[in-house]
Structures are given as C-alpha cells and as structure tokens.
Amino acid sequence: MSFVESEERRALRAAVRELGRKYGYAWFTERARSGGQTTELWQEAGKLGYLGVNLPEEYGGGGGGMGDLSIVLEELGAAGCPLLMMVVSPSICGTVISRFGTDEQKQRWLPGIADGSTTMAFAITEPDAGSNSHNITTTARRTADGWSLSGRKVYISGLDVAQAVLVVGRTEDARTGKLKPALFIVPTDAAGVEFTKIEMDLISPDKQFSLFLDDVQLPAEALVGSEDAALMQLFAGLNPERIMASAFALGIARHALDKAVAYVKERQVWKTPIGAHQGIAHPLAQLKIELELARLMMQKAAALYDAGDDLGAGEAANMAKYAAGEVAVRATDQAVQSLGGNGMTVEYGVASLVAAARATRIAPVSREMILNFVAQHSLGLPKSY
C-alpha cells in the first residue's frame, strides 16, 4: 500500500471536488429544509461515472474499488453535500450483488446502480434487532413459485428514492428447523411492501423509514447468493458500509474544519485575526491531525478490502469508522465554538452540521459496538454479551 495517492485518484478527487462545489452546502441545506431531495446531484454524479466507480466495468462501473468510492463521498461531503445513499446503494448493495449475485441479477441491477438511474436501499435493523443481528425475525418461507417474505425493519435510509431494497431476512433450515440469514432483493413497489417516514430531528434531505413486509411474494431469483453462505455475504457488505460511513464522517469533519479555519483567518477582535491565538489555533490543528489519521485508517481498510482480505478489512474498517466519527463530532463542535455566536446562525451554516456529525457515532454501528469488536477480536478479551 502506498501512502501517496495515484495520479488517477488525485484526478478523481479534483473532479469530484469541482462537482461538489457546483452544488455546495447552501443548495444541500435548502433541499433538506424544504423536504426536497438531492436528485440533480445524484444523477449528475451517476452520469459522470462517480457512483459506480467501484463496480465492474462490464456492468457499467469504473472497475475501481472501495478506495475510489470513498474518495467520491469524502469530497462531496467536504464540499457540503454528502450523499448518504452512496453508503448504501453502490457500496453495500452494489458490492454484494457484484460479488455474490447471479449473472441475471448483475445484468438487472448493477448498470442502473452504476449510472444512478437505480437506487437500492438496504434493510437490516429491526425494532428488536439493532446491533444484535442474530435476533432478526424477518422470515422468508419457500412457496411454489419462490419466497414469501414477512417482517419489519426500522431506520432504513432512502426508501422514498429507491426502486428496490436489499433485505436481510432468515430462512428455515430444513434439517435443523433453525433460522439462518439470507439476502433478498425486494422491489419497493411490490404488493405487501409499505413504509412510513420516521420524523428525525436532523437537517438532512435523506429520510429514514420503517419498512413493513407483509407476505411479500418474491420469485426464486430474488435470493442473492447462497442460503448457506449468507452470513459471509452479509459481512462482505458491512465492511464497505463502514468504510463509506468513515468517508461520510470525514467529509463532514473537513467541511466544518474548513469553515472554521476560513473564519478565524479573517475575524479580528484585537490586533491580529483570532486564528493567531493558540486557544483557537491549537484545537483546529489537533483536529487536522486526527482527521488525517482517520483517513489513513480508512484508506488501509479500503486497500485491504480491495485486496480481498475481508478479515483484515473488518478490523481496519471498524477502527476507521470509530476514528472518523469521533473527529466529525469534535470538528463540528469546535467549528461552532470558533465562530462564537456566528456559529449558531443559518448564515454561516455550522450548527446544522452538529446533529449529522453526532449521528456518525451511532450509525451504521455504534462506537460502543466497535469498542466491543476491538476488545474481543483485536485484543482477545472475553466477550461481554
């Protein structure tokens, strides 16, 4: 692994940065406050090939990896317009289908995911199965024509813009009678599919939903991959999710830090701009260091994943997500503090970042569960639950 990005990746950063600046934070927040969506940016990013940069070329993607896709999301976030569904559609769903889907599933779904004409949501969390995915009760039963799927999911992003959702359910093992995890592609307009918006105290154009599946009839080919390998397939999608969640958090952190730095360079109360005072400068310098360290871990996780080391990528991806979430929270808080009263105004657009940054410590996996993972898998400590 090189610590210096290739010329191609630097060019990708520069191009996406320009796209992000074309829209920017003012446009993004206007969409969020008005209840709108980021359709224009999503479609343009897809048309330019950025959404599918990690997907196979034969299905319309760029043939790159998670390292490339994370650059796209980080740069859009740094420009003030992070696309949350990038964490889900090309990252989780696109990765799982490209690795484990049938040829027919790849042909059906990947080109649209790559060019942005199709968005796919991901549904794993349930009311009684948050971090403990072993408690999932959404169940698929075989029928003469395929499957019948029933259950409930919560905090599912983007169902209002998705044409399909990759659902984590369970099937019954004919030999043992026990339930085992399985993945299904479910059209959002299928009979028996309903979803309702969860009112969130966040300023974001990306909405959260409760998903209800009532005897949804699916063809046999809705099953992704093997029933017996579904847990492995699930984790193959969760590592990219954590990498992209890191990119999302780093983008927010960079945007907040950039705003704070620009402000303290100009704001003058006494003889020099306030950025000359160590009480202001040192916390911002510390954030820069923490941000760069988090990005290095994210890049390591992406490199390991793209090299096929799922186990190594799992540890690095969890650590990256932890570090990125922490620096996002600190960066937004320090940006508000650096701007003082102006940090609380709509004009400067800093306070509105706080809740979004805070969410990166919770979703898609909480910092506490990451610490559990590191304690058990990295340090070999006894399991506490």
Image: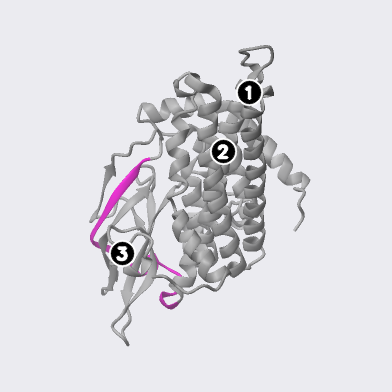
Q: Is residue 112 visible?
A: no
Q: Secondary structure at mark 1?
A: helix
Residue sitting nearer the eye, 43 or 243: 243
Q: Position of residue 230 (x, y in %)?
A: 44, 72
Main secondary structure type of the part rendered in magenta: strand
Q: Residue at x 61, y 57 (%)?
A: 56
Q: Residues within 10 Å of mark 3 (few under 14, many from 20)?
A: many
Q: Residue at x 47, y 62 (%)?
A: 105
| Badge 2 or badge 1: first in the primary sequence | 2
| Badge 3 or badge 2: first in the primary sequence | 3
User: Residue 212 in magenta?
Assistant: yes
Q: How far separated are the C-alphas under marks 1 and 3?
A: 54 Å
| Residue under numbered circle 3 | 218
Residue stretch in magenta: 207-228
Mark 2–mark 1 contact, CB under 8 Å?
A: no
| Label placed on residue 253 | 2
| Label placed on residue 326 | none
Q: How far separated are the C-alphas under marks 2 and 1?
A: 14 Å
Q: Residue at x 36, y 70 (%)?
A: 134
